[in-house]
Image (cartoon, rainbow, N blue to C red):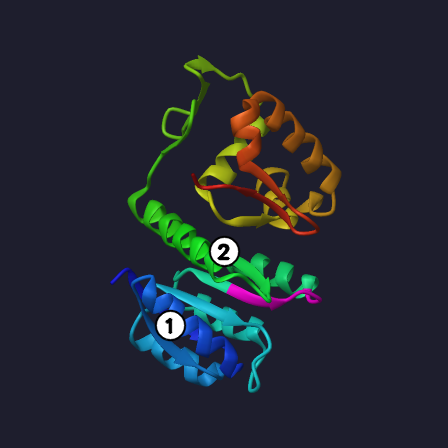
């Protein structure tokens, strides 16, 4: 088994097609249709990942996320309707690892689960080296190399890149990035972020730039190769 996934969603059709897909991918699946049904096994049996719908019948999904984060660092992937972008952003800011929009392709969801699990293992192992093609980022030595040559970054460019590397595969919201790199007084200064992301894309070369993707209206993601 690849791990145990807890699916908290009140739509029966989600469970009907998602359960077999997850099991075929090697996951053990636990099903919950309400917040109360989901929080009990999350606390007692420690799943490896949680898929969380925001629109639950007994409690708002954001409150479930807050309750999960009070006792667990388990990767949480939000399942969200397309017209609830503000709620997706709030969930990410409040500790969700990623989101997928409904309706979604199973292949994409499985890739997001794998990335979230890799990110959690990397944090647990304090991994400090990120490699993709000829791009190498060593967080321990604070070095960035492209085809063996050092890449000159300003301190703020490096701080932004390091944050994205530590969260590789995970979408980071504008607010999360701005707060961490520029401070809470700059959470609305999205233009700062766009400029620095542009600088990084220029300096990391075509392969590196392709890894640094924009999540429209939400933030940025460094793809995990």
Residue 81 relative to residue 47: left or right: right
Q: Residue visible at 70% across and 51% down?
A: 217
Q: Is 82 colored magenta in this rendering?
A: yes
Question: Mark number for residue 20?
Answer: 1
User: Which residue is the site of mark 2?
Assistant: 108
Mark 2: few, some, or many residues within 10 Å (few <14, many ≥20)?
few
Residue 215 visible (yes or no): yes
Position of residue 88 relative to residue 219, above or below, is: below
Image location (x, y in percent) of residue 115: 42, 50
Quadrant showing the N terminus: bottom left
The boundaries of the magenta stretch are: 78-84
Image location (x, y in percent) of residue 216: 68, 49
SS at mark 1? helix
Q: Are marks 1 and 2 in contact (CB under 8 Å)?
A: no
User: From mark 1 to mark 2, how far is it between C-alphas?
Assistant: 15 Å
Q: Residue visible at 52% across and 27% down?
A: 207
Q: Residue visible at 57% across and 58% down?
A: 92
Image location (x, y in percent) of residue 63: 55, 74
SS at mark 2? helix
Earlier residue among tags 1 and 2: 1
Residue 19 relative to residue 91: left or right: left
**Corner quadrant of residue 57:** bottom right
Image location (x, y in percent) of residue 87: 65, 65
């Amino acid at each position: 088994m690849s791990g145990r996934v807890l699916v908290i969603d009140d739509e029966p059709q989600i469970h009907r097609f998602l359960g077999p897909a997850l099991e075929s991918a090697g996951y053990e699946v636990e099903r919950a249709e309400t917040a109360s049904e989901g929080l009990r096994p999350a606390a007692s049996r420690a799943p490896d990942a949680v898929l969380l719908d925001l629109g639950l019948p007994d409690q708002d999904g954001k409150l479930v996320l807050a309750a999960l984060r009070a006792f667990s660092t388990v990767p949480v992937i939000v399942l969200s309707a397309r017209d609830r972008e503000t709620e997706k952003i709030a969930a990410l800011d409040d500790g969700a690892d990623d989101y997928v929009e409904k309706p979604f392709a199973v292949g994409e969801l499985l890739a997001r689960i794998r990335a979230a699990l890799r990110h959690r293992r990397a944090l647990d192992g304090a991994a400090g080296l990120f490699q993709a093609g000829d791009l190498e980022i060593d967080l321990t030595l604070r070095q960035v190399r492209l085809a063996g040559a050092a890449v000159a970054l300003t301190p703020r460019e490096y701080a932004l890149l390091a944050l994205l590397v530590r969260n590789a595969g995970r979408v980071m919201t504008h607010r999360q990035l701005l707060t961490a790199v520029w401070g809470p007084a700059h959470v609305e200064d999205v233009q700062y972020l766009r400029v620095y992301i542009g600088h990084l894309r220029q300096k990391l070369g075509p392969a590196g730039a392709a890894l640094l993707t924009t999540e429209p209206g939400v933030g940025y993601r460094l793809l995990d190769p």
